Amino acid sequence: MYLRSTAARPTAVAALALAATAVITPPAHAADGGDYVVTLDSSTATTDYTHRTVDLTGTLTRTDGTPVTDAPVQLEESVLFDTWNPWGDPIDPTEWETRGLGTVRTDAEGRFTLEDVPADRVDDRPSPFLAPRHQVMFRAIYDTDPTDFHMAFADTTVKVEPVTSVISYRVSKTKVREGDTLVVKGRVAWPAGHGPTAGTRVFLRTYFESEHNAQTTTDARGNFTVRATIRDYDNEFAIFSAPKDYYIAGASKDLPVKNVAP
């Protein structure tokens, strides 16, 4: 049995902090601001692989219910991921990929609309975050003075129903020692008609504090080979995939590997 040393923890925490600065992180709550109230609704509570767009509607009023007409309302979208936190530290459990959707104006009744909004990632690059929560949050903001940090806003969240994927594997050995090379070969697959498996990232974890210690990508058939050099303190072994498409769920497996180093 291995004791879980925290020796590597400062480095891992620093890496998390750096990753968190890569995207905008909006407050994870909603509130009314000053003299105004914003509401926001989505045309659907759930999206799936085939149906990824939503219509956003909302209202802007004064606190007494009077509509605010011809007013600019900013809209944002945040694709959500779970924070890697094996230590259980009191940090934000959510990673955010946030983008602006533009500004709409209210009508004579204080209403606003934005149609056919993709509830999805739009970046062609793979996400730096590896644990999709499969939720997309939208935010409407009315800010009369950007310098006073006081605004009215509202959120609505859409649940994503992803396509299920699978990962299969075989390991080169089930008992390892410091200096050994562990080789894991396998395949990632999901139902036909949901895009190619080629280029899917696959990660190997050998230590409980590390989200991953080695990685590779699949070939045209979804096959992969990933290797890691074993250290004396490596003590937990797992393989997992991170599809680029937010609407395809990753898969993971614990590996039957044991470090027998004294």
Image (cartoon, rainbow, N blue to C red):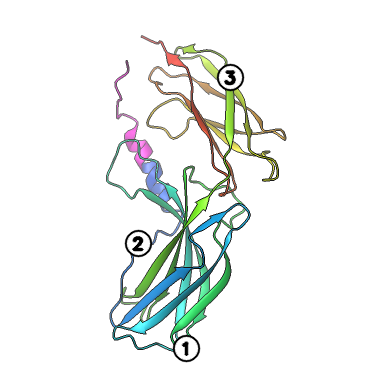
As shown in the figure, which amino acid type bears the numbered disc 3? Arg
Distance between the Cα atoms at labels 3 and 1? Answer: 62 Å
Label 3 sits on residue = 170
Alpha-carbon neighbours of circle 3 within 10 Å: few (<14), some, or many (≥20)? some
Residue 2 marker: none
As shown in the figure, which amino acid type bears the numbered disc 2? Pro
Residue 177: x and y, percent? 45, 12
As shown in the figure, which amino acid type bears the numbered disc 1? Asp
Q: On screen, 74 above or below 164? A: below
Label 2 sits on residue = 27
The segment highlighted magenta reads 1-13
Label 1 sits on residue = 70
Distance between the Cα atoms at labels 1 and 2? Answer: 26 Å
Q: Nearer the viewer, mark 1 or mark 2?
A: 1
What is the quadrant of the C terminus in the image? top left
What is the quadrant of the N terminus in the image? top left
Residue at screen point 70% across, 45% down: 193
> Residue 169's quadrant in the figure?
top right
Residue at screen point 65% across, 34% down: 218
Mark 3 or mark 1: name the one nearer the start of the chain. 1
Name the element at disc 2: loop
